[in-house]
Amino acid sequence: MMRGVIAGQPSPFPVAHRLPGVLQEDEFLGRFLGAFDEALAPLFLSLDGLGAYVDPQLAPTDFLDWLAQWVGIEVDEAWTVAQRREIVAGAVAVHARRGTTAGIAGAVRLIVDGEVEVTDNGGAAWSAEPGGALPGRARPRVTVRVRPRPGTSVDEARLDAVVTAVKPAHVTHRIRVVND
C-alpha cells in the first residue's frame, strides 16, 4: 500500500483563506498558495487519521509491523495478521507484568492456542550474616506447562524465545508441552 500525495485532494484548511480579505482577491497569490495547499493536504489528512495508525486493530498491515517494533515485539512471519494485531494490542499489559508468573503466562497465551500454566519454585537466597550459609533453595526456577488445543501445534523454539524474553534474566526455566 502506498501512502502519500493524492492528486486533486483538497486541503481541509486552504492557506489562501487565512489571508486578509484584500489579499484573497489576488489571483497570483491564490495560485502560489495553492501549491502549499497541495503539499499540506496529505499532512492534514494523515494527522486527522493518526488514531487509526496507532490503534493495532485499525492500523494498515504494513504499519502494524512498525508499530510492533514501537512496543518491543519481534514479529514472527508465521503469525497471521489477526495474531499480530492481538499481540501488539496486548504488549503493554505484558510489559507491565514482565518478570512475574502472570506476565510470563500472558506472553505465552498470546502465541499459544491452549492452556498455559506457569509456576515458580519461590527460590530466593539471602544471608543474615556476611559470608554465611544461604538458607532455602538458592536457584529460582520457572516451569511453563502448555497444553495446546487439539489440532494445534506449538513451536517450542519460539515458545522458548518468548519465555526467555519475558522472565527475569537470572531465573532458569523449563518448558513442558503436554499433548493429549
Image: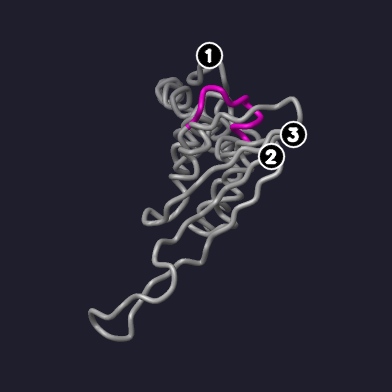
* Mark 1–mark 2 CB contact (< 8 Å): no
83 part of magenta stretch: yes
Which dot marks residue 103? none
x then y, percent, for residue 47: 53, 37
- Residue depicted at x 51% and y 54%: 142
Q: In the image shown, does 67 or 47 lie closer to the viewer?
A: 67
Is residue 68 in sight in this rendering? Answer: yes
Is 20 a magenta residue? no
Amino acid type of disc 2? Arg
Asked if the residue at tag 2 contacts the one at tag 3, i.e. Cβ–Cβ closer than 8 Å, the answer is: yes
Percent of width and height locating residue 33? 42, 26
- Helix, strand or loop for disc 2: strand
> Mark 3 against mark 2, which lies toward the viewer?
3
Q: Nearer the viewer, residue 89 or 94?
A: 94
SS class, disc 1: loop
In the depicted structure, whether residue 48 falls above or below residue 10: below
Q: In the picture provided, is 70 more to the left or to the right than 12? A: left
* Point 33% across, 85% down: residue: 128
Give the residues drawn in magenta, as a range: 75-85
